[in-house]
Amino acid sequence: MWRSELIRRKRVCFAFALLLAGSGAAPAAPLRPESLHASLASAPWSWRIQATRGQSSAAQSNAASVSLEILPSLTVNVGGKVSFGVTAKKAGYLILVDVDADGRMSQIFPTPELLEQSDGRDINLVKPGVQFVVPTPAGRQRGFEYVVAPPTGSAVMVAILSERRVQLLDLPDLPRKLQNQADTLSYLSAWTSELRVPDGGSGKLVPNNWSFDVKSYSIK
């Protein structure tokens, strides 16, 4: 019989708790930056990107026309289940980042647990003009769902689309609480402009193109 198990990730408190109904196996440990090269060799579809110093670019635009929808609505109740719909005009790799009402930032998709159980390199690949729903059908079959958890109040969800394959971000600690959509977008745009991503052919760290959509929502 399937059972539900609450998976706690790197940052303990954030708006959405991930429930896994499965065999009860322990979740995969997040990949560490120092193990980047070994991880690429053993599992090229799953790595944690490091921030490396590079030339800063102007504020990132939404060149891929990413659009994020929080379902069923922008007002959610503790204990309720939610999902996310994302569309874009260009193909890219989706990362969902939540900033909870206390200002804590966490990546909620894809997670190490999902990556560990996935056979595909493209678990978070968004195709142009096709809505990408999280949890994905494959994730739902494995028992993954998002259940709203405290703290209550105003929070922010960010859809980040990477032109190159990226699946785990080593998110920075916030210097202060991000108050609104504009603050969140500005901060993440500046931070991602410093990231360098391994090129699929040469393996060299190269600049990347990122697109964003931000939605504020309320937890009651």
Image: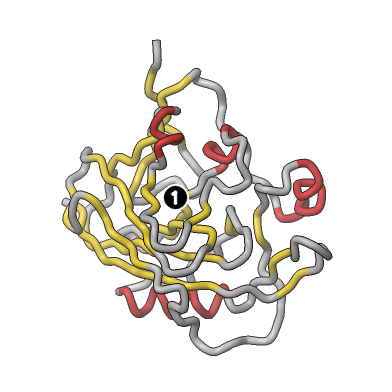
Q: Residues within 10 Å of mark 1 (few under 14, many from 20)?
A: many
> Which is more toward the observer, 177 or 78?
78
Q: Quadrant of residue 153?
A: bottom left
Depicted 106 relative to depicted 174: above or below? above
Residue at (49%, 86%) from the top-left corner? 59
Q: Position of residue 62 (x, y in %)?
A: 43, 77
Q: Residue at x 37, y 78 (%)?
A: 183
Q: Position of residue 21 (x, y in %)?
A: 41, 24
Residue drawn at x 29%, y 66% as measured from the top left? 215
Q: How is the image coloured?
A: secondary structure
Measured from the top left, where is residue 198 in percent x and y? 74, 64
Residue lying at 83% horizontally and 65% vertically, measured from the top left: 202
Q: Quadrant of the N terminus?
A: top left
> SS at mark 1?
strand
- What type is the residue that disc 1 sits on? Ile
Compare residues 179 and 92 and report the one nearer the observer. 92
**Which residue in the structure is indicated by mark 1?**
108
- Of 15 and 126, nearer the camera is 126
Q: Tell which residue pokes out farthest to the top in this image.
A: 1
